[in-house]
Image (tube, rainbow, N blue to C red):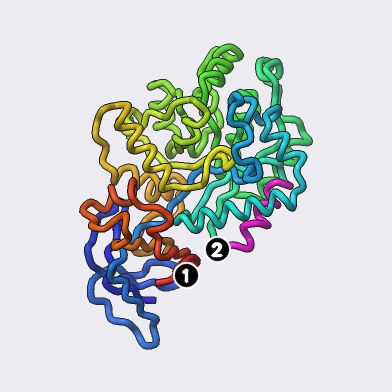
Amino acid sequence: MLIKNASILFGKELDFIANTDIKIQDDKFQQIKSNIRPSRNEDTIDCEGLLIIPGFVNCHTHIGDSIAKDITLNRSVDQKIHPVSGAKAVILKNTDKKYLATFMKNSCYSMLNKGITTFVDFREGGIEGVSLLQQVVSELPLRSIILGRLEFYQNSTEIKKNISLPSDKINELTQLLMKCDGIGISGANENSSSVLNYYSQISKIRAIHSSETTQSMAVSKKNTGISETQRALILKPDFLVHMTHATPNDIHAATKITRGIVICPRANAALAEGIPDIELMQKTGCIIGIGTDNVMINSPDMFREMDYLWKVTMGIHKKRIDPREILKMATVNGGKILKKDIGVIENGKLADCIFIDKHALDLEPMHNPYASIVHRASESTIRAVMIGGKIVIGKI
């Protein structure tokens, strides 16, 4: 396929190129330059008036709770999402799997329509939960990275005694890892240091929630005497999720040990927990990705996530932030954190991208493409979505 006359956000810095051509072959961007001549019988598409940006990488989701939208608005964080006693855990355990699958699929379609081409899911429910999500995504073009989880949570006494992972759970973990891309741990407060250390030996992706709430921070200090993030880092995670209340020392340590931090600002705000300090994270050199988190709390919409993060952060710090940096968090940085050839328009990268109509009512005239995408664009401004060189939503 040859795309002609397109505007694009190119490379790891999302440099704006007003007009260029793109050759796509074998599901990857093969060549990006002006005046590429089509080969014999090659499909050629004129993209005059379109801005092509990388597909969004939604680095943290829980789509299993898609069936439970907004049912716990006035409850505490633990009452909503505690992995053992929360309303979410009860719903996931007691709902017919066919119903769960139906609404999970709806969330996947929602992501595709909004330009999300890859999502990372912390999948509850052990092997059965992973298998259910695999079944759902097998029927869709959406890229998924499934991080499974053992249904194994330790109490404060077991954590203080540093109880190890039982042999039956070790066997179950082996089976689980054969079916998914890694592990997504609920948090350090449900696992002893011995268990976290055992998980740290896993060769696949390792990720964990950390420092999401003031309560979780207090529990860690009370039970172990150290911060929740210090304990989470025992896992040697590839990335941490949330870090809403992380201290400067926690963030510095995370920057040294992990590939990055994935933040979920709308979910944190919806839980009345504030939002992460991205200014401090950026000062430490941390790579920041963005996730939309639980569907029961949020729609899986990266446009809304970027818009909210950008404006609220500027409002809190009373300081301008380059919208290009926010857009990188939703695209390029996701590819870096996951070590995948996604989130960037560049030779050799997977051809996942979004075709934005520059003449859309909310965008024209587009004086600053980064600001336009971050706080003006929406699902309605998308002309088409491409994954692996194939148009999966819309047409061009």
Q: Residue at x 32, y 75 (%)?
A: 46
Q: In which quarter of the image is the N terminus?
A: bottom left
137 is within the stretch colored magenta: yes
Residue 21 vs 81, above or below: the answer is: below
Residue 244 vs 374, above or below: the answer is: above
Q: Residue furthest front?
A: 361
Q: Which residue is drawn at 23% across and 76% down?
A: 35
Q: In which quarter of the image is residue 316?
A: top left
Magenta stretch prevailing secondary structure:
helix
Cβ–Cβ below 8 Å for labels 2 and 1?
yes
Q: Mark 2 points at which residue?
A: 141
Q: Where is residue 275 in the image (x, y as percent from the top left)?
A: 42, 29
Tell me which amino acid carries mark 2: Pro
Specify whether residue 68 is in view: yes
Left or right position of 80 against 236: right
The residue stretch that appears in magenta: 128-141
Left or right position of 352 against 2: right
Mark-to-mark CA distance, 2 and 1: 9 Å
Tell me which amino acid carries mark 1: Lys
Residue 140 vs 278, above or below: the answer is: below
Residue 390 numbered tag: 1
Disc 2 secondary structure class: loop
Q: In which quarter of the image is residue 84?
A: top right
In front of the other: 125 or 232: 125
Q: Residue at x 78, y 36 (%)?
A: 168
Q: Residue at x 34, y 64 (%)?
A: 347
Q: Position of residue 169 (x, y in %)?
A: 74, 36
Residue 218 vs 165, above or below: the answer is: above
